[in-house]
Amino acid sequence: MNKLKNIFEPLRSINPRTMVILIVAEAVVALAAWQLSGGGLIPTPDKVVSAIGRIFVMPDFIDNLFASLVLTVKGMTISILIALVISYLSIVPFFQPLARFVIKCRYLTLTGLIFLFTLLTQNGHQLKISLLIFGIVPFFVTSLLSVIDGINKQEYELCTTLRMNSWQTLWEVIIVGRLDQVFEVMRQNFAIAWLMITSVEGLSMSEGGLGVMLIKANKYVQLDVVFGLLVIIFLIGMAFDYILGLFRHWLFPYTKLQTR
Amino acid sequence: MAIKVKPGGKVLGILILLGGLYAGKVFWWDKRPQEAKAATEIGKVNLPDAPEASLSGNAAKLELPSTEVSGNGGTRIQWKIMAWNSQFALMYANGGPKTTKNSLIDKAKLEVDVIRQDDCNKSIADMVKFAQDYKSDPNTPGVFASFMGDGMPMFFAALAKELEPLGPEYQPIAFYSMGKSYGEDKLMGPAEWKLNPKAAIGKTVACVLRDGDMNILVKWAGDNGIRVNPDETSFDRNAINLIAANDFLDAANKYIAGYSETRKFVENGKKVAKDTTVGVDGVATWTPGDVNIAQKKGGLINIATTREYAAQMPNITITIKKFANDHRTDIENLIMALAQAGDQVRSFNDAKAFAADVSAKVYNEQDGAYWLKYYNGTEENDAQGTKLHLGGSMAYNLADAANMFGLGDDKLDRYKIVYGTFGDILVKMYPELVPAYPVYNKVVDKSFLASVVSNHPELLTGAAIKVEYADAITKEVSSKSVQVQFETGSAVIRPESYAVLDDILKSAVVAEGLKLGVYGHTDNVGNDEANLKLSNERAASVVAYLQAKGLAANRLESKGFGASKPETTNATAEGRAKNRRVQIVLGN
């Protein structure tokens, strides 16, 4: 009884086991409600699960999955490198305007830009990668700059005390000292890349990809397959989230320290 | 025991892992012997005999192309097409996504890459990029794109403007048509619209604005004398209203999902601050949009399709003028290959099935059986049990292409009329978006086709698509009364009415699949017998005018009704003027 009261109380921390039970219970309730309210055009969970089974045995599923993963990993890697360069340089006043402009690019949509990018790139693959990069970089830069903004002044003062010049300070405090945060930034913004996958893959369908599978299933209103693909995309997204977190802790063990 | 690794080593480890995965994919997974997509077992599908066979009797059936890529070293071309069945001739001629050995295009010494691209804007961008590249490097592979013919005025308007800075040599031109939509593009609506088109007034149709499917609606409405409200944000009770969709599938989905939206009323040409909620009553879409509607919800029938408006939607191929002129021989050889392919596809079922299999490979979607089914067109019951005709395309042979561009026996330039008709509609409805469109003779270059037609009469043995017209019209698709001025008491048409008659001609040319009925009516002044005779003669004289312009005699029907079918009262002068009319009916 007391436990029940606890889970509805604000600011109350509950033990992990209760949390897990809570998550499972809420998921089950949601699925049951979906199963009972479904029917008609909306596919029920059992139909979606069987569709996932069918998707897995599709002959080109592995290739499509790989195409999407390669595209995303490629896009993410190039994006993070570009974003790092832009944000590190933003410390130098000359490059400030550029960094500020890039941040504002978040407000651009791809619709009108596809034409421009087509003219600038050589082929469909390049077009997809460059659109993806264009979509991700502003978000990366935004997050990285906020990381840099959040650096405690004492750290700079420490470097000054240690007789470092400003370039050394940049290296020690911002580049090396914040390397672990880069993973956090990638993790937070990975969803953006994953979100764009359908829109960019639709531009060059010949290479395939999960986005292409989604577009095709949608064309024939095969909603069970569409939902199945969405579930797969969702799970892969969560897996990436987890892996990036894992990498961060593994590469930078000190991030596991709890400082309170 | 745990191994201590420094971060640098760990990063290296991660990179090695990712690299290993990638290498495994490239060197093992992609190299493993893969189950090739099995060719569909065509023997089990009951195909109708090719009813539109163009080659008769002892026609030469060509050996099917191989599936092995040819690499003949000829002129390279990238051909951007959307997933559309009117391209069966290209599929057969190319033998695969890349030109295969022993295919007709291989024999024409060309290497064509057929690339699926559903986004028209992207194709326009590709064309602009190609023009730029070709200007700086004449060895750039050519780029072709194929679109629906009735949409060309808009594409050309956009393209011509983009390409202007490169100079007049780098303008786009259309040079051939390899097929057409023949039923798959349509206006679907409630059954009552078919019986009484006026029932569509004050209703809505979901469609992609300024798209070919919307053109079917606009034409059908125009032929019935119904206005279409071009503004997708307001609601006009006295017109058909449009609900804008993202694409042709979204248009169908809006009906299936029971979409509705709030609109401002239009009263006396002004938007008023009064809202109404409208749902989707009809849909203009194409396959598989129509299939989705039939299977998921049903309740709509075909009101008008490209089977009736049979000349509206040819597949038109474009490229850049300079490339075409630099490669004149290549293009003429290509036209010959496509024309022969059209004959093969039309005359031999296994050639058609082969083209369907290639389609599945090029579009990387469904299988050959699917594309074949909807190329032929099929009758299916919808979710509510109503029989519905779905799909339908046609491949052209040389005679069809010649007919399309006015190089056939009747010298009627059908495409010129289609281009002008829908270009004018666009400018009339959306002057702010498309203030003007390029003139026909500037963007359509018939010289390539004309040269093939005159130098290779042997390729004209394939019979053109024949439409069987009914003896008399029993089902009206549209009916409209027009005022034609005759000399008093006679059947001689006054010159000021020629423009009206030319509009009727254009309307009939686009609606190639329908018979045209011209019915004369008079007021009740004078005696009945004289009126009947006069109305007969007047209808006949309109028909004679249209025949002189190139319409076939078996397409035309003329009748006189005298004063027996007044539209309104004969008691006033105004009413009598309305009753003296010519009724123009398109039907079958």
Image (spheres, rainbow, N blue to C red):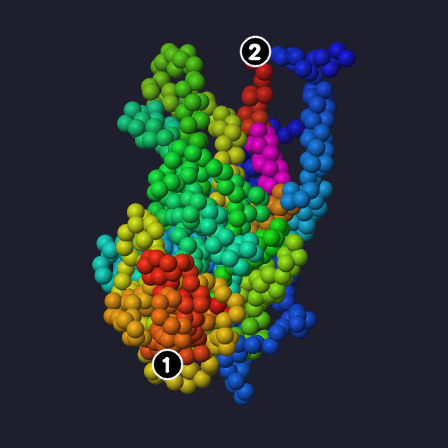
Q: Tag on residue B409?
A: 1
Q: Is residue A254 left or right of residue B485?
A: right
Q: Residue furthest bottom?
A: B58
Question: Residue B480: image x %, image y %?
Answer: 41, 62
Residue at point 33%, 78% (across, down) = B548
Q: Is residue A260 left or right of residue A145?
A: right
Q: Quadrant of the N terminus of chain B?
A: top right
- Determine if residue B137 is in view: no
Q: Is residue A132 above or below residue B99?
A: above
Q: Nearer the viewer, residue B388 or B478?
A: B478
Does label 2 lie on the same chain as label 1? no
Q: Nearer the viewer, residue B477 or B145?
A: B477
Residues rendered magenta in the picture:
A228-247
- Secondary element under disc 2, as helix, strand or loop, is loop
The secondary structure that most of the magenta stretch takes on is helix
- Identify the chain of the residue marked 1, using the numbered disc in the image: B
Residue matched to label 2: A260
Question: Residue A123: image x %, image y %?
Answer: 41, 53
Residue B317 falls in image quadrant: bottom left
Residue at point 23%, 54% (across, down) = B165
Q: Is residue B471 above or below residue B583?
A: below
Amino acid beneath label 2: Arg
- Determine if residue B124 is in view: yes
- Identify the chain of the residue marked 2, using the numbered disc in the image: A
Residue at point 59%, 49% (across, down) = A221
Q: Is residue B138 left or right of residue B299?
A: left
> Does the segment drawn in magenta span residue A235?
yes
Report how far apart the C-alphas of labels 1 and 2 lie in the structure.
91 Å
